[in-house]
Amino acid sequence: MAGADVGGDSGGRGKHKKKHAKRRMNIRIDMTPMVDVAFLLLTFFMLTTVMRKQQTMEINLPPNNITKVDIAQSNLMTIFVDDNNNIFYSEGSEKTTTKIDLSALLNFFKSHAQQNSKLVILLKFDRKSKYHMMVDVIDQLNVAELNRFSIAPLTDADKTALAKAI
């Protein structure tokens, strides 16, 4: 805590007492309790902080926009997500699109991955679709261990084809 060192008078000397200047009082502040509280707070915050790995997704981009990758139509599957969060798919060079539910997407991906090991998925999202739909579809791809996919915007021609499929 705190303490004060007060110097006392030396006692009575009688007549020969001289006037002495007042002695200065020494003050000593004990910093131990403050240090204890500081370390207690430090250990509390260190032990209650949640240490978790950041959830990030690695994206490999081509070195430039001119690069073209040729893929056989038999190895291509296109997934469409419209502005109402409906999911459609078409396989290969087929012009027909079929509606599929998000809950059935995982089994769909797994079965197609077993049939074709060179399968490449093209994901086309409408700009008005919800962001969580893109995340959910990519999560389903990751669970199905399909790592070869590409993301593209939904074109007007795709939107008219999807309108016919509904």
Image: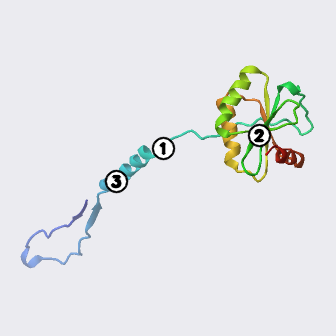
Residues at discs 1 and 3 in contact (Cβ within 8 Å): no
Q: Which residue is mark 2?
A: 88
Q: Could you tell me how many numbered marks the image carries?
A: 3
Going by the numbered disc 3, the residue's amino acid type is Val
Which residue is depicted at the point 93% across and 37% down?
Answer: 66
- Colour mapping used in the image: rainbow
Q: Earlier in the sequence, mark 3 or mark 2?
A: 3
Give residue 30's position: percent from left, percent from top: 29, 57
Which percent across, then down, holds residue 99? 75, 39
- Image quadrant assignment for residue 113: top right
Residue that numbered label 1 is attached to: 50
Residue 128 occupies quadrant:
bottom right
Q: Image height check: is 16 above or below 100?
A: below
Which quadrant: the N terminus? Answer: bottom left
Closer mark to the observer between disc 2 and disc 1? 2
Q: Residues within 10 Å of mark 2 (few under 14, many from 20)?
A: many
Question: In the image, residue 68 lies at what x, y percent?
Answer: 91, 33
Q: CA distance from mark 2 to mark 1?
A: 40 Å
Amino acid residing under circle 1: Val
Q: Residues within 10 Å of mark 1 (few under 14, many from 20)?
A: few
- Image position of 77 with respect to 81: above or below: above
Residue corresponding to mark 3: 37
Foreground residue among 101 and 51: 101
Q: Quadrant of residue 26?
A: bottom left
Structural distance between the alpha carbons of marks 1 and 3 = 22 Å
Q: Secondary structure at mark 2?
A: strand
Mark 2 near mark 1, Cβ–Cβ under 8 Å? Answer: no
Residue at x 68% of width, y 42% of height: 135
